[in-house]
Image (cartoon, rainbow, N blue to C red):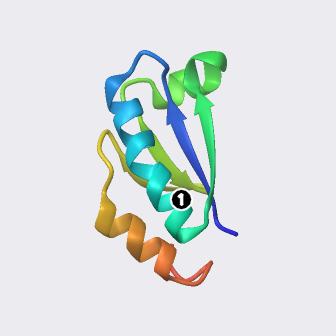
Amino acid sequence: MRQLTLYFREYCSLCHDMLAQLQPLQQQYGFALDVVDVDADPLLEEKYNELVPVLMEGATEICHWHLDLPRLLARLAAQPGEIG
């Protein structure tokens, strides 16, 4: 199962929008989604401060601010390790 991470802030409307868009896709494509509050970790807050929400697969950023659906779907269609 693919593992995606959403770097998130509770008070961020863009973050909630992206999470809401991801939930039906998660059911359809069967990926795991870890939602991480950047404000809970000073290192994450420093790294992702103005970029949240940020959607990642491993160390690879898929998108930030708004869901890039074509890029996400291309990653989900590819075999792990196929897209860098």
Residue 74 image-quadrant placement:
bottom left
> What secondary structure is found at the residue carrying circle 1?
helix
Question: Type of residue at label 1?
Answer: Gln
**Is 12 on the left-hand or right-hand side of 9?**
left
- Quadrant containing the N terminus in the rendered view: bottom right
In depth, the one of 47 and 33 nearer the eye is 33
Q: Residue at x 30, y 57 (%)?
A: 68
- Please name whichever residue, 1 or 82, is drawn nearer the observer in this view of the structure: 1
**Image height check: is 52 above or below 25?**
above
Please provide percent x and percent y for residue 80.
Answer: 62, 78
Q: Which residue is mark 1?
A: 26
In the figure, residue 43 lies in which quadrant?
top right
Taking 34 as reference, is 73 above or below it? Answer: below
Identify whether 80 is placed above or below 32.
Answer: below
Would you say 42 lies left or right of 56 here?
A: right
Left/right of residue 9 with respect to residue 3 in the rendered view:
left
Residue at 45%, 51% (x, y): give it: 22
Q: Residues within 10 Å of mark 1 (few under 14, many from 20)?
A: some
Q: Is residue 51 visible?
A: no
Labels in figure, total = 1
- Residue reaching furthest to the right: 1
x 53%, y 36%: residue: 7
Q: Residue 24: x percent and y percent?
A: 46, 56
Residue 50 percent location from the top left of the image: 36, 25
Q: Residue at x 35, y 67 (%)?
A: 71
Whether residue 2 is visible, yes or no, is yes
